[in-house]
């Protein structure tokens, strides 16, 4: 097998939610494999330093403002990306948010914020990108889920609902767009320390409990997502679509501390 299957040279990738955390990890992976990138965040100023980092890899980079809860913002951003590069080959649908509250305390706006961002926004970004991919009869859509795509946790019900929806959306879009040469898959990370989860890691007792439940006995590190992201973005995954790949150290096995 030729490793050229994993080469992204000449490809153009859009990564949403790229101002921090997983969005930056994934951007580094795709740029390192050769892709030119469009990186987005609600504030384009928050992307400036990261843009310089990606440019230092020898890649072209275009930072754009995007609010995935604003339909017009989505249309404008995808159009600007397409006009700049003439094509869109890869979409990493990463923008997301969370609200941590007991279920009885979740209010109407909490639910709307999380589900509108993670699920509705993700759909309409994918739709806008697919409209550019369909005429080219080529595309790779990578929807970012999480371990909550397949498991539920207390205190984050809207988030779990939205990530479960991402899995179902992925399968539906894969069936819809496969005829155009577009694959749609879900990359579901486990526990990684990011800006969104940093507060949890201040509790060492919780960290110890978490690690005990992970078969590989550690939380995720930034480069742990690289191989899967490149695989899903490249021609190496050309015959795989509608799938959810968990990169979670095995926590989705339901592992608990063994007793004998």
Image (tube, grey):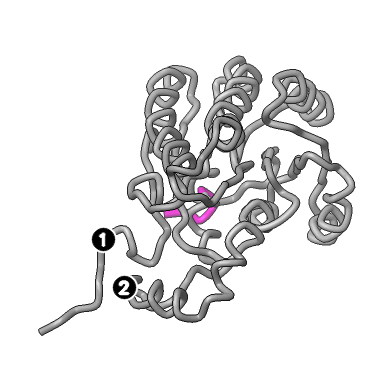
Whether label 1 touches label 2, CB < 8 Å: yes
Answer above or below: position of 173 versus 234: above
Answer above or below: position of 133 versus 158: above
How many numbered marks, from 0 up? 2
Cα separation, mark 1 vs mark 2, equals 8 Å
Residue 215's label in the rendered image is 2
Q: Position of 148 compared to 222: left or right?
A: left
Q: Label 2 crowding class (10 Å Cα cut-off): few <14, some 14-19, many 20+?
A: some
Q: Residue at 19% across / 79% down in the picture?
A: 258
Q: Position of residue 247 (x, y in %)?
A: 42, 58
Q: Which type of secondary structure does the marked residue at label 2 adopt?
A: loop
Q: Position of residue 168 (x, y in %)?
A: 38, 30
Q: Residue at 45% across / 74% down in the picture?
A: 206
The range drawn in magenta is: 1-5
Which is nearer the eye, 4 or 226?
A: 226
Instruction: Specify the quadrant of the image occupied by residue 15.
Output: top right
Q: Position of residue 232 (x, y in %)?
A: 49, 45
Answer above or below: position of 246 versus 66: below
Q: Which type of secondary structure does the marked residue at label 1 adopt?
A: helix
Q: Earlier in the sequence, mark 1 or mark 2?
A: 2
Say whether residue 104 is visible.
yes
Q: Position of residue 62 (x, y in %)?
A: 83, 41
Q: Main secondary structure of the magenta part?
A: helix
Task: Provide the residue designation for mark 1.
Answer: 253
Magenta includes 242?
no
């Amino acid at each position: 097998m030729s490793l050229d299957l994993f080469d992204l040279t000449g490809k153009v990738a859009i990564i949403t939610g790229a101002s921090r955390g997983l969005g930056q990890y994934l951007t580094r992976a795709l740029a390192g494999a050769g892709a030119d990138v469009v990186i987005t965040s609600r504030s384009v100023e928050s992307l400036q330093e990261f843009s310089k980092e990606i440019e230092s890899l020898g890649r072209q980079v275009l930072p754009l403002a995007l609010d995935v809860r604003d339909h017009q913002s989505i249309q404008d951003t995808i159009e600007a990306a397409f006009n700049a590069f003439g094509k869109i080959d890869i979409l990493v649908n990463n923008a997301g948010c969370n609200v941590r509250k007991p279920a009885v305390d979740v209010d109407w706006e909490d639910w709307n914020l999380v589900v509108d961002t993670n699920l509705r926004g993700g759909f309409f970004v994918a739709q806008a990108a697919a409209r550019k991919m369909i005429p080219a009869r080529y595309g790779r859509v990578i929807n970012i889920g999480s371990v909550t795509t397949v498991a539920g946790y207390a205190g984050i019900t809207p988030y779990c609902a939205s990530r479960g929806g991402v899995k179902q959306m992925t399968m539906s879009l894969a069936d819809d767009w496969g005829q155009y040469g577009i694959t749609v898959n879900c990359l579901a990370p486990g526990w990684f320390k990011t800006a969104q989860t940093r507060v949890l890691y201040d509790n060492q007792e919780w960290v110890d409990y978490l690690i005990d439940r992970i078969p590989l006995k550690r939380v995720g590190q930034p480069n742990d997502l690289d191989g899967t992201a490149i695989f899903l973005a490249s021609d190496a995954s050309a015959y795989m679509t509608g799938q959810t790949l968990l990169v979670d150290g095995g926590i989705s096995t339901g592992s608990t501390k063994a007793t004998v």
